[in-house]
Image (tube, helix red, strand yellow):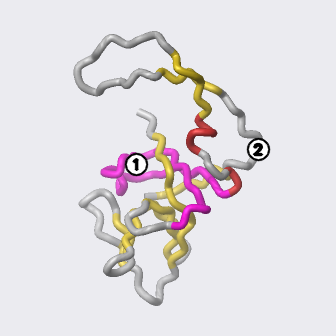
Amino acid sequence: MNIDYLGDAKDGELTHREMPYFSNIVRVGWPSPADDYVERSIDLNEYLIKNSASTYFVRVKGDSMINANIGDGALLIVDRSIEPKHKNIVIAAINGSFACKRLILKPEICLMSENPKYKPIQINKDEELELAGTVIAAINIY
């Protein structure tokens, strides 16, 4: 999976665009009549970005995280201020090459794909692993 760095959340001018937020739940099964009631507006920056100084965006290429709902071309929101924990999805640099994977800390450190056709990446003691942030959201465009 390739990663393209798109920039920090604090770079440039973050425009706050409030979009209508409907309080109804949209069911994925049989359709139900929807109300026209708008609860309030929602700002996606406010909703998704908790710490703009430590948040950045990357676009991914590949299918290794497809079972975690991260598709080819997805835009990831990554926060460097969140300490990566066991089973978090992270941006990792292995010997300088970046990847988006699930961090496994037990019993040994490895990076797991979310697609069974890819093997886990075992981290050996002589390899350099740098965790560049925890993925907090993935935006897929269909």
Residue 36: percent from left, percent from top: 46, 10
Q: Quadrant of the C terminus?
A: top left
Residue type at mark 2 is Gly
- Residues rendered magenta in the picture: 54-83
Q: Residues within 10 Å of mark 1 (few under 14, many from 20)?
A: many
Residue 4: percent from left, percent from top: 56, 54
Q: Nearer the viewer, residue 38 or 76?
A: 38
Residue type at mark 1 is Ile
At horizontal 58% and vertical 57% (from top left) the residue drawn is 79
Q: Nearer the viewer, residue 59 or 32?
A: 32
At horizontal 56% and vertical 62% (from top left) the residue drawn is 82
* The stretch drawn in magenta includes residue 56: yes
* The stretch drawn in magenta includes residue 65: yes
Q: Quadrant for residue 15, please give it.
A: top right
Give the mark nearer the N terminus: 1 vs 2: 2
Query: Is 105 placed above or below 77 here?
Result: below
SS label for mark 2: loop
Identify residue for label 1.
70
Q: Quadrant of the N terminus?
A: bottom left
Q: Quadrant for residue 65, please give it.
A: bottom left
Identify residue for label 2.
12
SS label for mark 1: loop
Question: Residue at the bottom extreme?
Answer: 126
Query: Is 75 placed above or below 123 here?
Result: above
